[in-house]
Structures are given as structure tokens and as C-alpha cells.
Image (cartoon, rainbow, N blue to C red):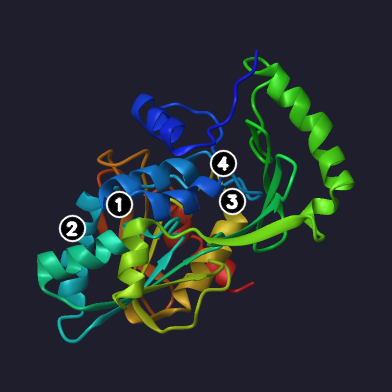
Amino acid sequence: MFRLGVTNISDLRRQLSTNGRAAVDIALFLEVSSAVADDEEAQALQSAVLSRMRFRNGTYKRTSPNRFDGFDQRLIKVANEAFPQGAIQILDVGVSDGSTSAALVRSFKKQAGRKVELLGIDRYMNMEIRRHKKRPIQFAFDACGDLVQVRCGNFVFNCHALESWIRFPVNRFLGNLLIPRWRRVFADGNGPDFNRNNVNLFGRLASSMKESGAMDLQEGDLFHPPPGPFQLVRAMNVLNPSYFPSESLAKAVIALRSSLVDDGLLAVGSNENAGSPVEGAIYRRTETGFERVEQADRPCRIDSIILDQFCKVGSD
């Protein structure tokens, strides 16, 4: 009928080991950063915190460092052949907690002995937690000011992914009834009764590499990417038909193409989890659009948008 949220590290470890699906307090992301010494465990726990978090545009932050290893090996080979000299400039789009970006940088160094200069962007890189000083109420907002999560006591409500009416009707009822009331009564956590903490949603691996200067991470929009130019743009698990309609996907491809050098590479793909087959491909920028140079385990879901519709949409 109801279930409580995950509000401490012990319960988070239990949820990770049992593949549980309860909502997780986003504040645990910060707590894991300071309380868990082992890098591998910290990364896994932080990924578990983010995996249940859904944002307004329908996306989740579900990832792991080795999620695209097989596809990345192909990508490194193609990129190494296309750009054999100097550091490779990479734009990585929709990087979630940055762990797959860090894995790509390490793989380039290990597999090809190449230096890369990688910029990873994601729309949701920062959050603000507003916690009441005396009462057990907490709000979490993204950088756009959208309310993403509310915690009251041991209940955690992900605002864009409330619990099912069928399985957990109490959670759904309380979320629908009380979240608007809490927002009104506590003014969204604005005022002197609330402490505010900013949370950078960089996982342990990405944070370490960012601090060392091995790569950079910023909030960014795939529809308005940095100008570059970059030799390689990678967009994994973001250009999905389940997230965007075809027109939006075409606009995103056009925008990403503008960030590439002539003959630059665009890598697009998606999969269910680490080690599962990737549906994707590697494309080369041409004078008029793109050509496919390498296919992943399975065809890319938006192959026709990238190849067949590019010129038509781009001429609008």
C-alpha cells in the first residue's frame, strides 16, 4: 500500500544490493561524497541515488562507468584513424553524472595512447536542496527552478515520477495532495527557516578527473551546444525517440553538426544497461549532412533522421 523512501546510506546500500526501486533522497549524493572512502562503492551508490530521479523532460540519470565499453572501443578506433595527430577535441552530450565521459577519456589513453580534451554537458548538472531547520521537510530544485523532489520525514516524492496508484496508492495520494500544500505553506523553501545547499551531480569518478583537469563538465543543452569546433561529438542515451519527437531529434542533430569540424564524427547510441547491445552508429560530417561509417551491435534508432531527413529539415 505504501513504501518509505531511502534516506540513509545503510538503506541505500541495501537498495543497491537488492535492485530496489524506492525513491532516494537526493541529499544522499552529497553524503556519499564525504562518507564513503572507496571510489568504486561511492560511484555505485551515487549512481543509485540518481537512477530513481526523473526530470521534467522525461529523462532519468541512469548510467554506469562501463556502460558503453564495447561501442567506445569501436569509436576510439574510428576516431584514431580519422584524426591521427594531436589531442582529440570531444564534446560529450547528455553525460548524466559524467562517469561514462571519464571512462571514455581513460579508454582513449589506454587503448590508443591518445590525449583527449573532453567537455561533457548535461541539462541537469546542478541542484539546490532547501532543508527546513526544524521541521522534517526538504525541497530539491534543478538549476531551472523546477521542483524535482520533496522529502517529508521518511517519505520521498520524486515529483515527475510519483509512485503507482495500483502498487503504492498511499504514496501517490499523499504526493498529489500534500506537495502543492507544502509548496504553498513553506513558500518552496524560500526564507530564513531553510538552509540551502548546492549539489553538483558529478559522480566520484568524474569529479576526480575534473579536478585533475583531465576533462571538464558543464550544464548545457544539446539543442544549443558549445560551438567548438570539436572533432568528435558523442550523444549516448539522449537522442531517443522515447524522449523527443522526430522534429526535435532532427533539430538536435543539426545543432550538434554545427559543433563539428569538417569530417568530424558524431557517435549516437543507446542501450538498456552496462554490457547490453548498443543500438547506434558513428557518422561523419559531410558537406550536406552525414554519412554512416560504423554501425554498433544494432541499428541506430534515429538513423533515418540523421541520414535521410537532414537536408530536408536543415533547409527549413
Horizontal side of 184 relative to 1 (left or right) equals right
Q: Amino acid at mark 3?
A: Phe
Density class for disc 4 (Cα within 10 Å; few <14, some 14-19, many ≥20) is many
Q: Which residue is mark 1?
A: 37
Q: Nearer the viewer, residue 135 or 120?
A: 135
> Which residue lies under the disc numbered 4?
25
Query: What secondary structure is found at the residue carrying circle 2?
Result: helix
Which corner quadrant of the image does residue 229 belong to? Answer: bottom left
Q: Nearer the viewer, mark 4 or mark 2?
A: 4
Mark 1 is on which residue type?
Ala
- Residue at image point 71% right, 39% down: 136
Give the residue number, with chain letter if any, for mark 3: 244
Residue on which the image places disc 2: 73
Which of the two marks, 2 or 3, is nearer to us in this view?
2
Q: Which mark is residue 52?
A: none
Q: Reading the chain from its start, which is encountered first: label 1 or label 2?
A: 1
Whether residue 66 is visible, yes or no, is: no
Precedes in sequence: disc 2 or disc 3: 2
